[in-house]
Image (cartoon, rainbow, N blue to C red):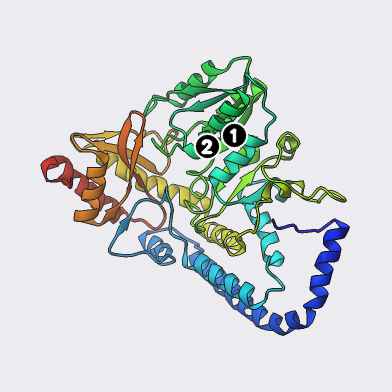
Amino acid sequence: MVIELKSTRRGFLRTSAVSLAGIAAAGMLRSTATAQSASSGAAQESASRDLAFDGPIDEAYWRKVRSRFVLNDQITFFNNGTAGPASKDVLAVHERVDREIAENPYDPFHLKEVVPVRQQIADFINASPEEVFFTHSTTDGMNIFAHGIDWKSGDEVIIARDEHPGGYQAYQTIEQRQGIKIVWLDLPAPPESPEQVIDIYRKAITPKTRLIVVSHVFFVTGLLAPVKELTELAHSKGLLISVDGAQSNGVLSIDVKKIGFDHYAGPGQKWLLAGTGTGFTYIPKAQQSKVWPLHGYDVIGAPSPYPILRYEKAGQPNIPAWIGIGTAIKLQLAIGKENIERRDRQLSLQLKLGLKDIPGVKLYTSLDPSLSASLTTFSVNGLTPDSVYQTLIDKDRIYIRTIIEDDIKAVRVSTHIYNSPEEVNHILSAVRRIAGNANQASA
């Protein structure tokens, strides 16, 4: 756990002793580390300036964005919704910080770089640094909130069947241990309107309901949930709402204050392109007293100026990864969050419109921009998801993923800022061929 200000006497004495013992050696190493940090920081700022724009954004600009990633040009990568590629800038930060920690063991936590990242994350979602904390993943953040609530036997939690296991499995454990009840919802794929989705949740609320758990964008169907309206519904009934942001963080502009989330967990490895094993979670100050930390934490002495840090206590943190989140955010801000969302939506709409016109293809994702973002789920009549997936790899070098959840057996495509209209046309051509020649698909 990284703590900006050590407030206990025991911790202060321990830290001071180590610092005094190593001050000479640290001084010898500091100049080298500082020079490397300055060089890396200058490179990052140069990359950000390189992506800044002052006119219309065209395909040449997006090719420049793509050049910031070490993508294999022999593969068309469409599985960002599982794990996206870290940018060259993020990879450089990981390497630099790992080296500095190895060279200078007297500064293993790099607080001067970590503390500003907390502010960057807060600004990115319109929160305060006292309301965000680092995690290893979205699942980590979802579990911290779920297990932190004081549950009573008979309490009800509303969860759709299409939720990610990382969002609902914590509640299955609590159901078995503490006797709460999960109220499972079936959502149409695609739904007719946002109002239809809201009505399904509304009808599930009972006097025993305490919480609604919902994905901002569902990983199975690509449904963009009407989270603002669901938040208003929850609060009008005195309920909490927990939002899984795995498929929205880094592709949609998130304003947690405007929407009113009680909890939002997001990853770094997907749309934010910050590398694996990273994430963050938001819990507003008003809710923090109601949510226990998942792990033990130091309660001796005066309270930390950042009480939310107690949710971060989970052993040795991955400092290079944490700092890399800040670099990924800088890259997104250089491009512009609205530009990223617009680009991703354009590519996904191109894909959906093309798939809609292919005989034998079924779309599970809505064409309505109020009900979809940048995930597209579809199936090909007569073929298993594995067959479509393998054929695209074997014959077209296109990488996607399968989706097999309850009644949906399909494949899913993610379109992000490093993809191009030509790549979308490539997969459309391949799916058109597969749908027309099902007997030639890979087994």
> Is residue 254 at least partly visible in the picture?
no
Give the label on residue 167, or none.
Answer: 2
Give the label on residue 125, or none.
Answer: none
Q: Quadrant of residue 365?
A: top left
Q: Nearer the viewer, residue 292 or 118?
A: 292
The spot of residue 94 in percent (x, y) is 55, 67
Cα gap from disc 1 to disc 2, whole angstroms: 9 Å
The spot of residue 92 in percent (x, y) is 52, 71
In the rendered structure, which amino acid carries the disc numbered 2? Gly
- Other-residue count near label 1 (Cα within 10 Å), few / some / many at <14 / 14–19 / ≥20: many
> Is residue 278 at least partly visible in the picture?
yes
- Give SS at disc 1: strand
Q: Residue furthest front?
A: 177
Would residue 161 be found to the left or right of residue 264 on screen?
left
Q: Residue at x 56, y 27 (%)?
A: 176
Residue ID for mark 1: 242
Q: Residue at x 48, y 20 (%)?
A: 200
The spot of residue 144 in percent (x, y) is 63, 41
Residue 179 higher or lower than 378, as above or below: above
Q: Nearer the viewer, residue 58 or 31?
A: 31
The spot of residue 275 in percent (x, y) is 50, 59
Q: Residue at x 72, y 73 (%)?
A: 106
- Give SS at disc 2: helix
Q: Tell me the quadrant of the picture where the C terminus can be found.
A: top left
